[in-house]
Structure formats: structure tokens, C-alpha cells
Image (cartoon, helix red, strand yellow):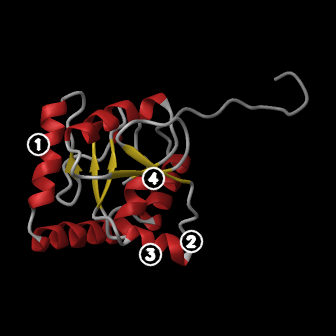
Amino acid sequence: MYIGIYKPYKNLGYLSQIAGRIPETKIDWIGSGLSFPHLKPRGSIDFSTPQAKELIQNYDFMITVGNSDPNPTTILESMSWGLIPVCTEQSGYAGYPGIVSLPLDDLPGAERVLRQLQEIPVTQLLEKQHANWKLLDEHFNWDRFTDQVIDAIESDASPPLRRFQLGGAG
């Protein structure tokens, strides 16, 4: 499934082209925007509901093919739900064992990756899932995020911010 809105940088035309090359594999779209052939629209869904959690269990993969969409949170969210992210390297998530890279602007290559994923033994999918849960626990967590923000704020390496006054020139 794809999760998100339609924006040009999300590259849904490319995702639709990929889906058209593998008609035996359905790609659902949870979100809103234009309609695309080969993508089944599911509309917006509140993922905090039991119905949404039940729906997620019908999928193995969350796919996103942005051409300039750095760090979409849907990748980390889908990992926490047990889905395997499949994404272009332009997402910023490359080189992680549980995240599958999909080539950008290479329909035969993208088709090949998705067909191979459909044939992976369940044990390998579970290994990717567990690698992602470990990655969330050890790397993509709030402690690390807040430590980085605090370090950046307290760092002497950055120039001081200009003084700014509300309501006046400044």
C-alpha cells in the first residue's frame, strides 16, 4: 500500500506505472488527491482505530516512490506496524537491511524488485520486520532525536541568531 496525499514530488504517476506492470499485485492508496489508474483508492483512514489496524494486517509492504520527498514519516510509522518499507533512495532511507530500495525512473528495475518481494520466503520477511523494529528501538527514537536537537541548539558551531522583535522593525 501507499500512504499519503498527492503532491507532484510523491511521484504517484510513477507508482501507477509500476502497478500497471504487475497487475496481479494490487497497490492500494490510503490518502487523498487525484486518481491514478492501477492504484486502488481507499480514502483517508484514521490509523488509531481498530478498523485501520485490522486493515493494515492485510499488507506486507508500504511503498513510496518520491523523487524529492526526504524522510517521509510514513516509512517509520509503517515499520512500527510491522510493514516492510519499499522506497526510492530519495526518501533518505537507504542502506538499511529491513528497508527495500526501489529504483527511481526505472520501470523494469522497479518491477523486478516488487516481483522478487512477492516471492521472498516468510522467514526473510520476518527478518526484515525484526531488523526494522530493532532500528526503531536503537536508532529512530525520540531520545536520539531530542539529543540531536539539543546539541544543535547548544552548539557553538552555528552562528548566533539575529535578534528579532515582534511588531516592530528589526
| Number of the front mark, 4 or 2 | 2
82 or 53, which lies in front? 53
Question: CA–CA distance between discs 3 and 1?
Answer: 29 Å
Residue type, mark 4 in image: Thr
Relative height, residue 44 to residue 55 (above, below): above
Residue type, mark 2 in image: Ser
Circle 1 is placed at which residue position? 112
Residue type, mark 1 in image: Arg
| Number of the front mark, 4 or 3 | 3
Q: Which residue corresponds to the image point at 13% horizontal and 36% vertical from the top-left?
A: 109
21 or 77, which lies in front? 21
Circle 2 is placed at which residue position? 48
Residue type, mark 3 in image: Glu
Secondary structure category for the residue under label 4: helix
Q: Which residue corresponds to the image point at 17% horizontal and 68% vertical from the top-left?
A: 125
- The x, y position of residue 98, in whole percent, is 21, 60
Circle 3 is placed at which residue position? 54
* Label drawn at residue 73: 4
Q: Which residue corresponds to the image point at 50% horizontal and 37% vertical from the top-left?
A: 6
Question: CA–CA distance between discs 1 and 2?
Answer: 34 Å
First in sequence, mark 3 or 2: give its number. Answer: 2
Question: CA–CA distance between discs 4 and 3?
Answer: 21 Å
Q: Is residue 96 left or right of residue 47?
A: left
